[in-house]
Amino acid sequence: MAPGRWKWRRCWGSARPSASPFTTAERMSRGEAGPAATEEPPFSRAGGVGVRAAGPGGVWILDKPAGVLSHPNTAGDRGRALLPWPYDAAGEFFRDPETGRQVWLLNRLDSATSGLIVVATEPTVAEAVRALFAGRAVSKTYLALVFGHYAGTSELWRDRMGVVRRGRGVQASAEAADLSAVTEVRRLRLVSGPPALTLLELRPRTGRTHQLRHQCARRRLPIVGDRNYGDFRLNRAFAKATGSGSRLFLHAAGLSFRYSWGGREHAIEATSPAPEAFVPYLPPGKGGRRR
């Protein structure tokens, strides 16, 4: 069965795969977000940041809206970050200034990207899950709305790319092409327009900086709202016509992995429903979140 067509039943200590007729993105677009964690995490969160799943060893999958930073870059950013605590960039953790509690950040999303992000409250688990991300052992699914019509139905994108520093930030580049970038692509819907649009499911096998945005743009399928690699004229026209503002139409919709804790293996999965801005472009009959 193709990747993404297994739905893991989350339980405390074991996981059993069950066949699903829908991929992660399809289940997400149908509003089937999976079981959210029932307890509150032992840390504060920025406004709008939800909890989608929790696992043994203090693993938490959070769901952030667009505009929230994965971590603050300066002290002034703290009010816009995932957690409102000071951040240790070297150790990649937040620290509660009152209790000293630490929460490790295990993956990152650009501030403009919405969706799933993982944290942990136990250092040994944090180290293990970070190794899974580095070793490409985490399944990730994104939704992207792009300008143009993607002619295929599914394929594997393989590119060489690099990352160069530009001022205070970084930029993906086809010139410094020393890294492999691989993504599974599946077309979910064509929108006739104008402008012509395509809703894509993207499943990155590698985790390069700005990988999905770069790979879409180099195929002349820029992600709607992308200020770095997008079509700026179309972005302005689309925002004016739809009232979407500066929204980047890239959403981290699904995430799953297996990890060890307490001498046992555990599996955790979360899906995030499509944000409201995506709803008009979902396949007919598929819903999303409305907020």
Image (spheres, rainbow, N blue to C red):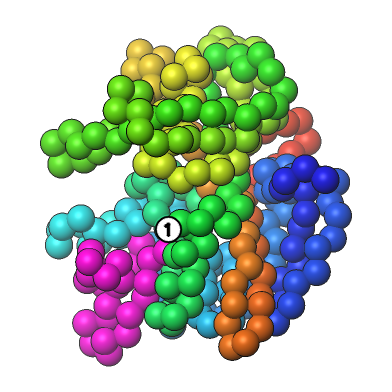
Compared across the picture, whether 17 is left or right of 291 comes to: right
Picture coordinates of residue 256 (x, y %)? 62, 59
Q: Check disc 1 and report its element: helix, strand or loop.
A: loop
Picture coordinates of residue 21 (x, y %)? 85, 46
Compared across the picture, whether 281 is left or right of 240 comes to: right
Compared across the picture, whether 9 is left or right of 157 comes to: right
Quadrant of the image occupied by residue 90: bottom left
> Image height check: is 102 above or below 72?
below
Return the residue nearer the eye: 239 or 262: 262
Return the residue nearer the eye: 132 or 224: 132
Return the residue nearer the eye: 230 or 77: 230
> Image height check: is 224 above or below 266?
above
- Tell me what residue is drawn at x 61 percent, y 14 percent: 149
Picture coordinates of residue 69 (x, y %)? 32, 53
Please give the residue where the numbered disc 1 appears in the rendered image.
Answer: 107
Give, as a three-letter code, the residue at label 1. Answer: Asn
- Tell me what residue is drawn at x 34 percent, y 18 percent: 232
Point out the stretch of residues depicted in magenta: 82-106
